[in-house]
Image: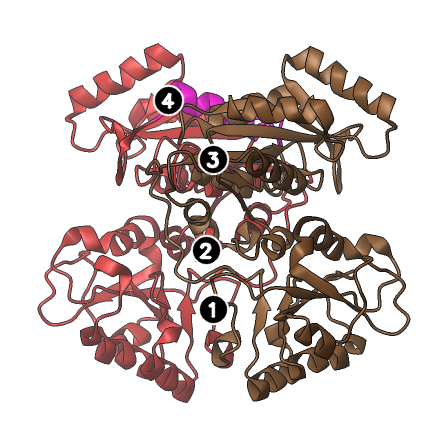
Chain colours: A brown, B red
Amino acid sequence: MSNAVPVLREPDALPQPYLLFLGDTTEPGYAKTAFGLRDWAGERCVGEYACAGASVSTGLPAMTPAQARLAGARAMVIGVANPGGRIPGAWLPLLIEALQAGLDLVGGMHARLSGIESLRNVALAHGRRLIDVREPPPGLPVASGRKRSGKRLLTVGTDCALGKKYTALALARAFRSRGLDADFRASGQTGILIAGEGIPMDAVVADFAAGAAELLSPDAEPGHWDVIEGQGSLSHPAYAGVSLALLHGSQPDVVVVCHAHGREHVLGHPHYRLPTLEDTIDLALRLGSRTNPAIRCAGVSLNTAGLDEAEAQRAMGEIAARLGLHVADPMRGGEPFARLVDACLA
Amino acid sequence: MSNAVPVLREPDALPQPYLLFLGDTTEPGYAKTAFGLRDWAGERCVGEYACAGASVSTGLPAMTPAQARLAGARAMVIGVANPGGRIPGAWLPLLIEALQAGLDLVGGMHARLSGIESLRNVALAHGRRLIDVREPPPGLPVASGRKRSGKRLLTVGTDCALGKKYTALALARAFRSRGLDADFRASGQTGILIAGEGIPMDAVVADFAAGAAELLSPDAEPGHWDVIEGQGSLSHPAYAGVSLALLHGSQPDVVVVCHAHGREHVLGHPHYRLPTLEDTIDLALRLGSRTNPAIRCAGVSLNTAGLDEAEAQRAMGEIAARLGLHVADPMRGGEPFARLVDACLA
């Protein structure tokens, strides 16, 4: 259906800066995309807009689409997800207002913006685009396995949803702050919104998944780093295939293994114990060596949210002693994180 | 586009028996699907049909679609692939003739039958279906990882295209000949045409690949065996993700590792050496134990095409001695294959 109207996702960079749309959300947990954009692409977010009654705020200036357009915004991004990933009817007048004000609409939900007829009609009438970042680019190739130039780091995890994206963003930022040429490469919808480009690995047809990963970090200068957002886990009962395709296609020189302190079971799969960090590292190196025999593990990114500083330092110290590797929480930064960055670049 | 016409693939069993269509083929290598159907579903193939000038034959009786319909055929199957997977214009009059004679059309090529307007129009006018077996069923779930009842065997390989489908078919046939309740479960297009049903794993969106594999071998009686066609290889630089999703979702109790004698590099990837059998077995058991801790390897299926009998016996004997496992070529059968079947059922 989306092939019938000229309001498709373009495979290239997304229109920025953004106005962040917060819907009618009263639960901060549903606004993770908006908070991620504020934290990691704040210089490309001019403000926020919400339905009457919404109580969640990013702290950015509230403005209408027309005001945002005057402030330079080129698109309004759906910054919230609600249960089921649907687009409620209450949002539609505000989405239409944004199109009429000259903004494109960008969404990362399961429900496609281009699947809503009233939005398609308004977008067509105003020459605006409906961009669904969960739509992979057309014409993806089968992976070649050919070694590419430049350097690559991939974050791999013991599970989903424990910090692979934030770790990659923090490492890319740290690399750049040391004067290196580095790009964050997004493999999921929130990462794509932050980076302004990327490939939603989970939406690619399986035969082309490693090929998509190859496309995500193309040939580059010898000193250039691509810091690639990982997906899932090699031990995940549902998503390991995506993780392996991303690992093979990324050909990382370095992996950083991400884990959440205290998590013992796979999220949403309580009958599956998490793999150990040792097993996760060993598996990533064994499988990753197929397309890059020089792969190595630089250390562990430990999500210590919920711990106080002393507890966090103790948790990181215990794992560092056990594994003989650098361990840091990128959100705490400091000396441990600086040493993890050193180890990545060593 | 295919959503707009009522001539879609149905998720259930395919219409059989078949008339095999051989196109204008003069190269037997392009007719592997027709030969596979003759060899493994011969009792459900009433005859063959081809363009004038075709020189390849399955040995089945030549007949027109009208004659085939009278003989009980319900569908004509495209039994050949040509380079690029296209449908040449010269085939169209014969495909239309089949629809007009009351046969559905079934294809497994990359090019979709339902993508050709003239076929759509004739199918609509005659109430016939255009069935593309490379189209996965809608509404596939994310894998749950839940252990299912019944027994499962998966063929895994050191590479693509070396006998995983034939091995699974031969094992399912052998299990049934011993009085066991066994089903061949097809995961690729030719296997689906043979079985009359199945899921094309390579065409499933990556996030749902393990879920598709779970659906492929549902809960069954405790004594029932599903013998599942493997795909790709866990060491393949392009397709390993598909193989891992199939392994996790299949939850096999038993794997049989398939290898082609003398193959040293990945087909189409000459810079990649094949993994050893030892490495392939170890990796399959390590990764497979995630969803079925009781997984074991029953032996090796060795493709010895091109060797004479003495050479084949020597090749199988060498590997059996090296690995301490049963090794057989299912196409040669005999005592070695009987012992491999014993080992699967032990």
> Residues in magenta?
B275-296
Q: Nearer the viewer, residue B12 or A317?
A: A317
Label 2 or label 1, whichever comes before in sequence order: 1
Tag 2–tag 3 contact (CB < 8 Å): no
Mark 4 Cα shell of 10 Å, populated few (<14), some (14-19), many (≥20): some
Distance from label 3 to label 4 (Cα)? 30 Å
Circle on res. B9: 1
Circle on res. B277: 4
A183 lies above or below B26: above
Q: Nearer the viewer, residue B37 or A319?
A: A319
Instruction: Give the foreground label among 3 and 4.
Output: 3
Tell me if B44 is positioned left or right of A334 in this view: left
Q: Does the magenta run of residues contain A100?
A: no
Q: Chain of mark 4?
A: B
Reading the image, the residue beneath label 2 is B203
Distance from label 2 to label 4 (Cα)? 28 Å
Mark 2 Cα shell of 10 Å, populated few (<14), some (14-19), many (≥20): many
Tell me if B55 is positioned left or right of A259 in this view: left
Instruction: Give the foreground label among 2 and 3.
Output: 3
Residue beneath the point at 57% across and 51% down: A202
